[in-house]
Image (spheres, rainbow, N blue to C red):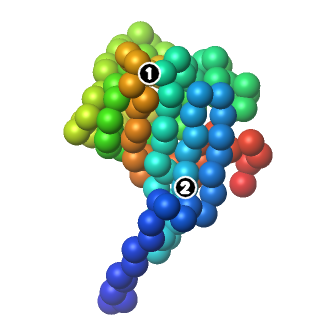
Amino acid sequence: MTMTLAAKSHDQPDDVRRFDHGSVAVVNVAGVSVGRVVFEPGWRWSEHVRPLAGTASCEVAHTGYVLSGRLAIRMDDGREAVAGPGDIFVVSPGHDGWVVGAEPCVLLDWAGGAEYARREPQ
C-alpha cells in the first residue's frame, strides 16, 4: 500500500474562477480537488452562473462544509434547505442556490469544486 501525505494552502490555489457576485479558488492536492467558494450577498446561481453553465439549473453535485454565511438551495423538484456555518451539505445535480442575508457565504466543496463555474469543459 502506498501512503500519501500532502498539504496545500488555498492561499495559493491552482485555479481561480470569478463570476458575478462570487468566486471559487480550487486547490488540487494528491488527486483531490477542493474549492473554496465565496458567494457575495445578492448572488443567485440562476442569475450569475447559469450564463456560464448554459443549463436550466446547476448540474454539478456538491459535497461541502459552510464556513460562514447562509446558502439556500432549491432542488428542481421543489424541495428546499438552508445551510449555515458548521453545516455539511450534499446536493445532487438539478438545483438553484442563493445567498440568504447580508453576509457572504463562504464554503468548501469537495465534490463540485473542480468543475464549478468552469467556462470550458475539461
In this view, the residue farthest toward the top is 78
9 w.r.t. 40: above or below: below
**Which numbered circle lies on residue 99?**
1
Give the numbered dot on residue 59. none
Q: Quadrant of residue 55?
A: top right
Q: Residues within 10 Å of mark 2 (few under 14, many from 20)?
A: many
Question: Is the C terminus in the top left, top right, bottom left or bottom right quadrant?
Answer: bottom right
The answer to whether one can see residue 91 in this image is yes
Q: Quadrant of residue 119?
A: top right
- Disc 2 residue type? Val
Total count of labels? 2
Q: Is residue 121 left or right of residue 11?
A: right
Left/right of residue 74 with respect to residue 68 in the rendered view: right
Identify the residue at horizontal 47%, vertical 60% (top origin): 10
Nearer to the camera, 71 or 10: 10
Residue 52 spot, x, y in % from top left: 72, 32
Residue 75 seen in the figure: no
In this rendered view, identify the residue nearer to me: 52 or 7: 7
Quarter of the figure with the N terminus: bottom left
Label 1 or label 2, whichever comes before in sequence order: 2
Disc 2 secondary structure class: strand
* Residue 102: % across, % down: 40, 18
Residue at the spot 65% in from the left edge and 46% down from the top edge: 17
**Callout 1 crowding tier (Cα within 10 Å): few <14, some 14–19, many ≥20:** many
Instruction: Determine the residue positioned at 50% across, 31% down.
Output: 39
- 101 or 50, nearer to the observer: 101
Percent across and percent down for residue 60 are: 54, 37
Residue labelled with disc 2: 26
Asked if 108 appears above or below 95 in the picture, the reply is: below
Could you tell me which secondary element the residue under label 1 belongs to?
Answer: strand
Relative image position of residue 88 (x, y in whole percent): 27, 40
